Image (cartoon, rainbow, N blue to C red):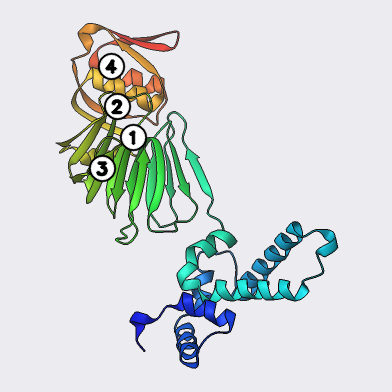
């Protein structure tokens, strides 16, 4: 058989019209016998058999016809109704290889799910493809209950750590504000809180492509590198980031500071707890060494921080003040 000139979709339409030549009929029947249409169409579907799926399609078609036909003419074309319904079922099953995605989207639509965390709450989920996500506090991820098509799309607001299952044929695409991250399979962290000045993508292992609304090409980012997108300027910069492995702990709320400025530590606590911290000017540059677990109550964390830094804290209205 010359497969280069073989078009199953065209032959299927000819078969329905009764215009197949004997040779074309043989080709079409051989093609149909070569694949398991039941396994193809039932995969990712809530139907248990092609018969159940066909009956569902037939029922939906009959209901649609009844809606569109006036009551006085509803019984005039019973034969036409049967033939049309049969043709739809035949095409749905016989051309499953060609129209698999549209068919599945009709009989088993993809549902969009939103998963969120509150302040001081760390949550973990596994997506339909087996990819894992660790969601940081005050963050939201939107994703489909099943992945179909050429890409796996999710949206993130806030911060999340990803371990993406490798799939060369279906890139994993994350939209976070003006930044898009394309992945084949790797682990990385995205920080994209609405109120922060930048969006950061840090790679722990593997490689990702990062682009912004203003960039024409993607930055290729590998392990121990990150990109920083400045919202004010629309500029996307790639830089070395040797401490990328810290996100393995931070995804669980464990922060190990090794000489970070108190200003940076306070900013991290603001993000994780959803609070506002104000420092006395002379404290901003002081270095902090220590481990903080942001799953603990806020007062416990502030007490530990102040004990190490020999400072005190108090709350005024909605702001936490740190003094010498």
Q: From the viewer's side, name the closer residue of 80 and 298.
A: 80
Q: Judge whether 178 appears above or below 85 on screen.
A: above
- Which of the two labelled residues, at mark 4 and mark 3, occupies the earlier sequence position? 3
Which quadrant of the structure image shows residue 137? Answer: top left
In the rendered structure, which disc, 4 or 1, sits on the residue that comes first in sequence? 1
**Coordinates of residue 201 in the picture (x, y in percent):** 27, 38
Quarter of the image where the C terminus is located:
top left
Label of residue 307 in the image: 4
Q: Residue at x 60, y 71 (%)?
A: 48
Q: CA distance from mark 4 to mark 1?
A: 40 Å
x 56%, y 74%: residue: 91
| Residue 4 - label | none
Which numbered disc flags the more N-terminal residue, 2 or 3?
3
Residues 27 and 17: in front is: 17
**Residue 178 numbered tag:** 1
Dot 1 or dot 3, earlier in sequence: 1
Farthest residue to the bottom: give it. 22
Residue 40 vertical placement versus 111 (above, below): below
Q: CA distance from mark 4 to mark 3?
A: 41 Å
- The residue where tag 3 is placed is 210
- Check disc 4 and report its element: helix, strand or loop: helix
Residue at x 32%, y 11% (from the top left corner): 278
Q: Nearer the viewer, residue 61 or 313?
A: 61
Which label lies toward us, 4 or 3?
3
Percent coordinates x, y for residue 267 in the rendering: 30, 21
**Residue shown at 55%/82% (left/top)?**
15
SS at mark 1 in the image: loop
| CA separation in Å, label 1 and label 2 | 8 Å
On the image, numbered disc 2 is attached to which residue?
231
Q: Mark 4 or mark 2: name the one nearer the start of the chain.
A: 2
């Amino acid at each position: 058989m010359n497969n280069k000139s073989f078009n199953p979709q065209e032959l299927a339409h000819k078969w329905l019209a009764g215009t197949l030549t004997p040779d074309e009929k043989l080709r079409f029947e051989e093609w149909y016998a070569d694949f398991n249409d039941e396994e193809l169409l039932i995969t990712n579907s809530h139907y248990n058999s092609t018969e159940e799926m066909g009956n569902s399609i037939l029922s939906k078609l009959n209901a649609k016809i009844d809606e569109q036909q006036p009551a006085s003419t509803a019984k005039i074309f019973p034969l036409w109704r049967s033939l049309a319904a049969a043709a739809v079922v035949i095409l749905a099953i016989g051309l499953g290889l060609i129209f698999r995605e549209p068919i599945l989207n009709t009989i088993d639509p993809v549902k969009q799910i939103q998963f969120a965390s509150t302040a001081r709450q760390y949550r973990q989920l596994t997506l339909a493809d087996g990819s894992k996500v660790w969601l940081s506090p005050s963050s939201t991820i939107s994703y489909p209950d099943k992945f179909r098509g050429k890409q796996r799309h999710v949206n993130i607001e806030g911060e999340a750590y990803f371990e993406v299952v490798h799939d060369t044929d279906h890139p994993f695409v994350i939209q976070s504000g003006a930044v898009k991250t394309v992945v084949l399979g790797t682990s990385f962290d995205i920080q994209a809180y609405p109120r922060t000045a930048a969006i950061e993508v840090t790679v722990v292992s593997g490689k990702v492509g990062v682009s912004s609304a203003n960039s024409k090409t993607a930055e290729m980012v590998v392990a121990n590198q990150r990109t920083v997108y400045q919202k004010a300027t629309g500029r996307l910069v790639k830089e070395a980031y040797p401490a990328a492995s810290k996100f393995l702990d931070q995804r669980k709320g464990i922060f190990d500071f090794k000489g970070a400025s108190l200003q940076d530590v306070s900013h991290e606590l603001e993000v994780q707890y959803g609070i506002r911290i104000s420092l006395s000017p002379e404290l901003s540059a002081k270095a902090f060494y220590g481990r903080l677990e942001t799953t603990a109550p806020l007062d416990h964390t502030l007490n530990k921080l102040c004990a190490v830094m020999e400072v005190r804290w108090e709350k005024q209205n909605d702001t936490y003040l740190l003094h010498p």
